[in-house]
Image: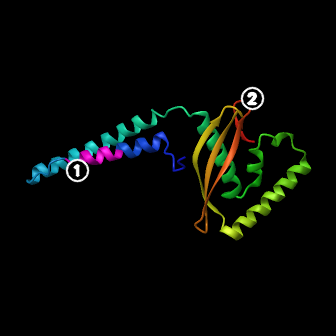
Amino acid sequence: MSHGHTRTHTESCWSHGFARFFTFLFSLPVPYDATALRSTRLLSRAVAVLAAGLLMVGCVGNDAPQTEEQKASLVAKECYEGLYINGHPELFLNGRIDAAQMPQSFRQQLLSGYSKHLRQVESQRRGVRSIEVASAQRDSTLNLVQVFLTFHYGNGSQEEIVVPMVQATDGSWHMK
């Protein structure tokens, strides 16, 4: 199972478009006289502006609709970033499917535990520096999406966790 960085459609479109543009630009013949050199520079600038405009129109307008796995992955990543990167345990707690039905005393206990865990991760691993979505897989028998997140810690270590995500009746995704 591969857990490398997954590129979005926009990322791959931009990188592919720029690669093609620069390959074209560097394949243009080099003129030897000053008049031809000036007109080639003007042409190159015009081509660069035109290519950038076409690239933006082609990439921005062609984003494929997000799959349910991608939507679940984004929510999982945002919840964990809320906790580890931004230091807001409430964001993490509110990402749980059962958050609205929790008694206030239980919410406070969880928030206290999350805060303690944050301090522990900071002291042991120098905190979480970034979180990436490695992959996501739909489990139709359990009716959820397993999201694999890679944590990059301040001490250089990495860890992959699995976040089970469930879809609410309104179509939103939440941590189980």
Please name the residue shown 20% across and 50% down the image: 41
Question: What kind of element bears circle 1?
Answer: helix
The image's mark for residue 104 is none
Identity, as a three-letter code, of the amino acid under mark 2:
Thr
Q: Main SS of the magenta segment? A: helix
Residue that sits furthest to the top in the current view: 169
Please name the residue shown 46% across and 41% down the image: 10
**What is the number of callouts on the image?**
2
Q: Which residue is mark 1?
A: 26
How far across and how far down the image is residue 84, in percent?
68, 58
Instruction: Using residue 167 as the reference point, say whether residue 73 is left or right of it.
Output: left
Instruction: Using residue 37 as the reference point, say whether residue 144 is left or right of it.
Output: right
Count neighbours of disc 2 (C-alpha within 10 A) and say few if under 14, some if 14 to 19, many if 20 or more: few
Q: Look at the image and name its color scheme.
A: rainbow
Residue segment shown in magenta: 18-27
Question: What kind of element bears circle 2?
Answer: loop
Q: Which residue is mark 2?
A: 169
- Seen from the viewer's position, the closer of residues 167 and 83 is 167
